[in-house]
Amino acid sequence: MEEINMRCGTKCFIVTIEMDQQTFVEEIGARSQAEARKMTRHHYGNEAKVKRIIKKTD
């Protein structure tokens, strides 16, 4: 993803994605885990499988 949009209530999530037998790790700014999953699917498409979502701690 190009950049993290910071909105009110936004947290940073680390998302592990599996697509085409490859694994990717992305940082996504979202308000919830569900929104992070939605943003990931919107960017990568429905063929991408979200394997893990973790809230990033400072």
Image (tube, rainbow, N blue to C red):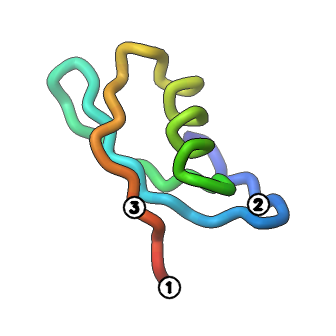
| Residue topped by disc 2 | 6
In percent of width and height, residue 45 lies at 48, 17
Q: As rendered, which of 52 and 1 lies closer to the eye?
A: 52
In percent of width and height, residue 26 lies at 43, 49
Name the mark on residue 58. 1
Q: Identify the residue shown where x is 81% and y is 59%.
A: 7
Q: How many marks?
A: 3
Give the quarter of the image for residue 50: top left
State which mark lies toward you, 3 or 1.
3
Name the mark on residue 54. 3
Question: Which residue lies most toward the bottom here?
Answer: 58
Q: As rendered, which of 58 and 35 lies closer to the eye?
A: 35
User: Above or below — where is 39 with respect to 19?
Assistant: below
Q: Identify the residue shown where x is 61% and y is 54%.
A: 32
Name the mark on residue 31. none
Q: As rendered, which of 33 and 12 lies closer to the eye?
A: 33
